Image (spheres, rainbow, N blue to C red):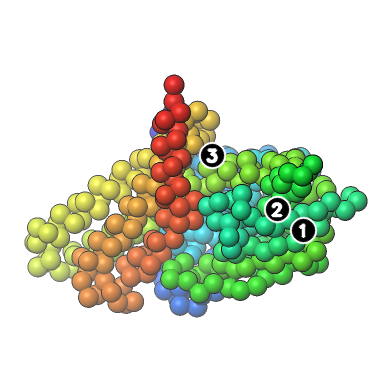
Amino acid sequence: MDLQFTEEQLLWKNKVRELMEHQVAPCPAEIDANEVFPEDIKELFAKNGLFRTVVQPEYGGLDGKLLTLCLVIEEINRFCSASSIVLGNQSLGAAPIVLWGNEEQRSKYLPGIASGELLASFSLTEPNAGSDVGAMTTRAVADGDDYVINGNKIFITHANVADVQTVFAKVNVDGKDRVTAFLVDKGTPGLSIGNKEKKMGFRGSSTVEVIFEDVRVSKSSMVGNIGDGFRIALDALDKGRIMVGGMATGLAQGALDAATAYVQERSSLARQQTIQFALADMETSIQASRALTHKAACKYDDKEKDHIRFSAMSKLFATDTAMTVTSSAVQVLGYDGFSKEYPVERYMRDAKIFTIFEGTNEVQRLVIARDLLEQK
């Protein structure tokens, strides 16, 4: 495992930092208030090639390295969570095709995903099937050369603007239900968007219900084979959790940046040891979070056998760190920290979702413990 960054990775990290500072930094409060998908941010990312970080080079991607994506997305979330999920959800939505798609599917979708022409989404969660994927009730029934999908999904990020989504449904084979993945294009008859969630944080990211009423897709839209869906979802989430670690680290760094700047402008605060200790603890936790996330990304890129455990650990530690650091940042600012005039209020609201999506942190602890106990 090599934790050294390539020159190209550092160039991309610096490019994105400059892009965010000059073109996005003034926007997060407005994006949060409007609660609308930031189409202009999506176009900005497409223009600057950021979506290339989620696709392998042969389909128009950059270097195919998860570490590169983590470096880029951390810089984005340092300034704006709603912007980071534009790239983050593109990665998650593309992951089933990247990891499991056949040549026809990859050639059809990945170039457009890399250019930003197409947006992808990941439709897994249901009203009674969150962490327990096996409880899903969405079904796909074979009908000639097609499958007909019925059911509904909730808390699906960007499904209302997605051009293609990977939909997980149960297919019954010989009396047994097999979770299976299908690619469903925007505009397919029977596909509709239901309720849009009103959320505590991540307000610029649209989170919606997706309804499937006799949605007919061809058998060629199946990703992998019948019954591969559960493995496809896990593979996508194993990758996504490390990316979430990068996002959470960036959010925590943004909160520390804001708190530090606030204290530096007030010499009386800067002299208080309790404030100094708070900043020191925040910095230490963030550095540890970053190091663990980068290590997990390298293990994933190198396909080391313990990469799944490190994926869970990076997500667990980085997201818990984001919660602790953003809360500390609010505390450092006092009443100002509770005001929307300062960004730490938004950082704290945004931080909570990281401990929930891509598998709750309770699930991550199970993954880590089970991996340890199964070692021989």
Q: Is residue 367 shown to the viewer in this render? A: yes
Q: Which residue is mark 3?
A: 65
- Who comes first in sequence, dot 2 or dot 3? 3
In the shown orientation, is residue 223 left or right of residue 373? right
| Residue 123 versus residue 232 in the image, above or below | below
User: Which residue is most to the right?
Assistant: 144
On screen, residue 237 versus residue 102, left or right, reads left
- Mark 2, Cα crowd under 10 Å, few <14 / some 14-19 / many 20+, is many
Q: CA distance from mark 2 to mark 3?
A: 30 Å
**Cβ atoms under marks 1 and 3 closer than 8 Å:** no
Query: Do callouts 2 and 1 mark residues in contact (Cβ within 8 Å)?
Result: yes
Could you tell me how far apart the alpha carbons at marks 2 and 1 are, in whole angstroms?
7 Å
Q: Out of 137 and 50, give the one closest to the viewer.
A: 137
Residue lying farthest to the front in this orientation? 175
- Mark 2, residue position: 169
Residue shown at 32%/52% (left/top)? 321
Helix, strand or loop status at disc 3:
loop
At x 55% / y 60%, what residue is drawn?
Answer: 86
Q: Nearer the viewer, residue 291 or 239?
A: 239
Amino acid on which the number 3 mark rests in the picture: Lys
The three-letter code of the residue at mark 1 reads Ile
Q: Is residue 70 visible?
A: no
Q: Amino acid at mark 2?
A: Ala
Mark 1 or 3: in front is 1
In the image, 73 versus 278, the foreground residue is 278
Residue occupied by mark 1: 149
Question: Where's residue 249, x and y in %?
Answer: 37, 51
For image coordinates 40% across by 61% down, the residue present is 352
Mark with earlier residue (1, 3): 3
Mark 3: give few (<14), some (14-19) or many (20+) Cα within 10 Å: many
Q: Residue 47, position in %: x, y?
A: 59, 59
Residue 344: quadrant of the picture? bottom left
